[in-house]
Image: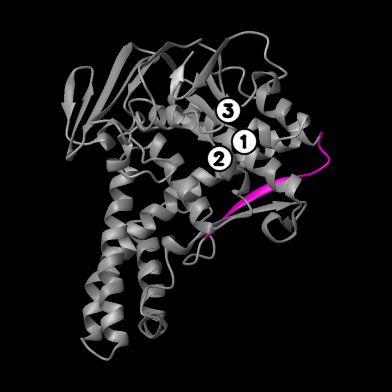
Amino acid sequence: MVIDRITADGYKNLENISIRLDPKMNIICGENAQGKTNLIEAVWLCSGCRSFRGTRDKDFIGFTKDAAEVGMVFTDSIRQQEIKFAVKKGAVKDKLVTLNGVKLPLLSKLFGSFRCVVFTPEDLNLTKGSPDNRRSFIDLSVAQIKPSYISALNKYNNILSQRNALLKTLSMGYGDESSLDIWDEQLAKTGAYISVLRYTFCITLNNYTKQLYNYFTNGKENLDLYYQSTIFNDLNGRTDYENGLAEEYLTRLRDSAANDIKAGFTTLGVHRDDLGAFINGLSVREFGSQGQARSAALSMKLAHAKILKAEQGEYPVMLLDDVLSELDPLRQRFVLNNIDDMQVIITCCDSKSVTEMTDGKVFEMKNGRVE
């Protein structure tokens, strides 16, 4: 998958952007606060995902602008396609989103058409940070392989919200505890399905990540990833999410009902699961050095791209937002050596920091414009 052209105007501080990209390496350099990350964010939104910076729709539009427009022409393994979206001040909910000229109801409906992997400095804390970040990483990765997974997640979260609302009422001494049954049954079925898909993906992720990390450390350290379920003791070989696993999930929910009522929320489930990373048998989160944590995170993100290639038949576009400046030369080479088969967009303050670059294009950004 390759981006041919990007256009943007009015998106935050971006003005009259229109650039044709190299099919391999593209460096966007410039001082801080010039718009480099805004451009990366605009590209990421074309994948149908939410902003990796948490930007709200109304904040897409620059302070002095009346509208924000972003366009992208890209080529996948089958054909060339075009994405456009526009947001007007005062009518943010009425975004105009089109794919090949066909209007879509939501930006999220683009999901699955254009695939990319974004890597930010915050991702370097993937193995050390909050379990929320690791769950989000797994969920996005699974969804890019199986887009229908998003529906299951949304369904689970809606059911969970209803169950938690009831638990809060019960914790205050009101309501009927038997009312939990209807939510428990629905949560168990959806939760079992999500558990199986997550676990299956994590097995594949571990295989790729283990190879990459082994290559990086010259075989001196072994990295292992384990999906840590709060419901199931062992998911190995289990696929019966409609029957046996759903029943086990339901049993655990019912057994934890008293604790849940006391807490006022659901204490067990896929919303509390985690992905554990271990180097030579020791938890990276608890005992890993900063270098080990960063190397493990790098391996996981690069593995994500390689899994998409294996599953979809083509590499995604790799977006590296000011990551290389956070890495020492050894880890820079590790990243660059493992993205040489795909199109890459790198932002940095100085193009000289990409010491391994031998071909490609360099763009300079200043005040939201490409010079």
Q: What type is the residue that disc 3 sits on?
A: Glu
Tally of marks: 3
Asked if the residue under mark 3 is in contact with the one under mark 2, i.e. CB atoms within 8 Å, the reply is no
Vertical arrangement, residue 125 with respect to residue 180, above or below: above
Picture quarter containing residue 25?
top right
SS of the residue under disc 1: helix
| Residue picked out by circle 3 | 31
Q: Is residue 57 visible?
A: yes
| Tag 1 residue | 208
On screen, residue 304 versus residue 111, left or right, reads: right
Q: Nearer the viewer, residue 283 or 146?
A: 283
**Labels 2 & 1 near each other (Cβ < 8 A):** yes
What type is the residue that disc 2 sits on?
A: Thr
Marks 1 and 3 sit apart, C-alpha to C-alpha, by: 35 Å
Q: Amino acid at mark 1?
A: Tyr
Q: Dot 3, how many residues are within 10 Å of its Cα: few (below 14), some (14-19), or many (20+)? A: some
Looking at the figure, which quarter contains the N terminus? Answer: top left
Q: Which residues are magenta?
A: 218-228
Q: Nearer the viewer, mark 1 or mark 3?
A: 3
x, y percent for residue 45: 36, 32
Q: What is the crowding at mark 1: few (fewer than 14 residues within 10 Å), some, or many (at least 20)?
A: some
Q: Nearer the viewer, residue 366 or 281?
A: 366
Percent across and percent down for residue 44 are 41, 31
Real-space Cα distance between discs 2 and 3? 39 Å
Which image quarter: residue 80? top left
Marks 2/1: CA–CA distance:
7 Å
Residue underneath mark 2: 204
| Relative image position of residue 8 (x, y in whole percent) | 34, 21
Say whether disc 2 or disc 3 marks the residue closer to the N-terminus: 3
> Horizontal placement of 126 versus 168: left or right?
right
* Residue 215 visible: no
